[in-house]
Amino acid sequence: MRIAVLGAGAVGGTLAALLDRAGHEVAVTARGAHLAAIAERGLSLRGGWGEHVARIPAAERLDRSPELAIVATKAQDAGGAIAAGAELLAGVPLVIVQNGLSGIDSAAASAPSSPLIGGLALFAASHLEPGLVEVTAPGALLLAPGSRGAGAALALAARALAPLLPVQLGDDLRAAQWSKLLVNQVNALPAVTGLSVQATVAHTGLLRVLTRSMQEAARVAAASGARFAPLGVVDERAVAALRTLPTALAAALPRRMARSMGDVPNPGSTLQSVRRGVPTEIDHLNGAIVDAARSAGLQAPVNAAITAMVHEAAARGFLSPDEVVARIAAIDAPQTRLGALARRLGGARG
Ligand SMILES: NC(=O)C1=CN([C@@H]2O[C@H](COP(=O)(O)OP(=O)(O)OC[C@H]3O[C@@H](n4cnc5c(N)ncnc54)[C@H](OP(=O)(O)O)[C@@H]3O)[C@@H](O)[C@H]2O)C=CC1
Ligand SMILES: CC(C)(CO)C(=O)C(=O)O
């Protein structure tokens, strides 16, 4: 099948290389040094799904109409990436592989005549250097209809992708996006501190901050009427427990999430953006919780503070875990003994 991948970074590059290895006619869009490296040496894949060098056409924009296109940019770039190929993509089924809640809406605005499929990657991949991507934790790709009448497009996408990696079919994209948004609470603290997801969860104080932000997200979701589709370790029961249990017990969920990512340190996609000096997606992750809280007439102070810290770290450098813990303790637990102690000491340990 003739398949285009728009944004061949960690996720898009992995899918492009797997599709090429399976014999599809793949073309990718990329930019800068990554584009130059793919054009010169091919796109190299390594890690959990083996090694492959995909020698495939790469350019800043498409020059041929594909039968299927996969959009795998960060959320803020998807509209521009689709618009750049709008004429060649008219009516072509699009699979939008993206975290956050807004992917399908921005694709619908840029590609109004295309059937849309939502994709949620449950695997983890790193864009290590120009031309090289690594799968750090193999996992499934969930596909669900993102527009009316997308059934045939969904079948086409599943036919191309299911032989390459585990494909899960969903019927409620919004509920799956909320589940993934909760999982993506693990992205921010690595982007603030430079630690991996696993190291973040192993740090007592950061684990508490992560759990507090997940509990806040779960409460905002409940106030917004959000549902949670079963996705990895997240489902309605796990979210209800998160909402109601004391933080020390609720921490079992982020621990399970980190374990499911295996032993290879996973920076997460947000830290990777910080390291590469490109804009992060944080306004569509923790920032989406802040927006949802505002729409529900609530506040989400922990998610707001974490979003601000990611912007700060991206602009000025990483913060120490103790600094992060102290800042969150000061806003999140002002009435508790822990909060008082943290403020008195100017730092907290857990
Ligand atoms: N990495 C992971 O493990 C996972 C990521 N995700 C999600 O998948 C999505 C993609 O993330 P990820 O692969 O990590 O991101 P990357 O930044 O690694 O890849 C996105 C690529 O798209 C490129 N790009 C952006 N705009 C354009 C454009 N207009 N034309 C061509 N190329 C463009 C970027 O270039 P540049 O670098 O120049 O910006 C980058 O190479 C995100 O929504 C992320 O949250 C989901 C699960 C796991
Ligand atoms: C789940 C996780 C953290 C996997 O890397 C992810 O979705 C991301 O990095 O954006």
Image (spheres, grey):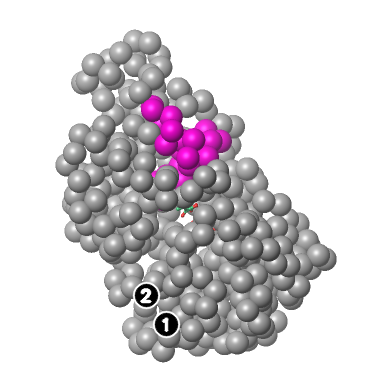
Q: Quadrant of the C terminus?
A: top left
Main secondary structure along the magenta-highlighted residues = helix
Residue labelled with disc 1: 154
Q: Nearer the viewer, residue 174 or 63?
A: 174
How crowded pointer 1 is (Cα within 10 Å; few <14, some 14-19, many 20+) is rated as: many
**Image coords of residue 59 (percent x, y):** 72, 71
**Bounds of the magenta span?**
184-206
Q: Nearer the viewer, residue 316 or 15?
A: 15
Based on the picture, tell me whether residue 203 belongs to the magenta stretch. yes
Residue labelled with disc 2: 169
**Image coords of residue 140 (percent x, y):** 45, 65
Q: Amino acid at mark 2?
A: Leu
Q: Residue at x 55, y 46 (%)?
A: 264
**Image coords of residue 14 (percent x, y):** 60, 65
What distance separates the C-alpha of mark 1 from that of mark 2? 9 Å
**Image coords of residue 299 (percent x, y):** 26, 41
Q: Residue at x 37, y 54 (%)?
A: 181
Q: Is residue 32 visible?
A: no
